Image (spheres, rainbow, N blue to C red):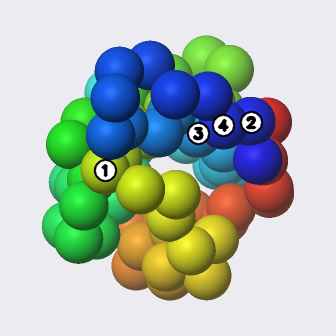
Amino acid sequence: MTAQTDTPGSVTAVYQVSGMSCGHCEGSVSGEISEISGVTSVKAVASTGEVTVVSETALDENAVRAAVDEAGFELVGPA
């Protein structure tokens, strides 16, 4: 996972997700990941498959994987 501290108390991580092809896909993935406790923002980009997540603390990759699965896509891993 690529993690960096942007501001005190926040962590940014970039994940690779397969199967996204449109804005609706981006919204589905973003919506599910947004429900993880501590997540403050999510940006999914279908054209690259990258999902950037900003959270209060580092996230458990299993929680992110479960959210992506719930949206109907596959978490490939950290970008």
> Is residue 72 positioned above or below 53 on the image?
below
x, y percent for residue 49: 65, 32
Question: What's the residue at 35%, 47% (across, down)?
Answer: 55
Q: State the residue in front, 45 or 38.
A: 38
| Mark 3 element type | strand
Q: Residue furthest front?
A: 8
Identify the amino acid type marked 4: Ala
Identify the amino acid type marked 3: Ala
Q: Which residue is mark 3?
A: 13
Foreground label between 1 and 2: 1
Question: Quick check: 24 left or right of 72?
Answer: left
Question: What's the residue at 31%, 50% (across, down)?
Answer: 56
Residue 21 visible, this angle: no
Question: What's the residue at 66%, 37% (across, down)?
Answer: 3
Quadrant location of the C terminus?
top right
Identify the amino acid type marked 1: Glu
Badge 3 or badge 2: first in the primary sequence: 2
| Mark 2 element type | strand
Q: CA distance from mark 4 to mark 2?
A: 4 Å
Mark 4–mark 3 contact, CB under 8 Å?
Answer: yes
Question: Quick check: 69 left or right of 56?
Answer: right
Q: CA distance from mark 1 to mark 3?
A: 11 Å
- Neighbor class of circle 1 (other Cα within 10 Å; few <14, some 14-19, many 20+) is some
Badge 4 or badge 3: first in the primary sequence: 4
Q: Which residue is mark 1?
A: 56
Q: Which residue is mark 4?
A: 3
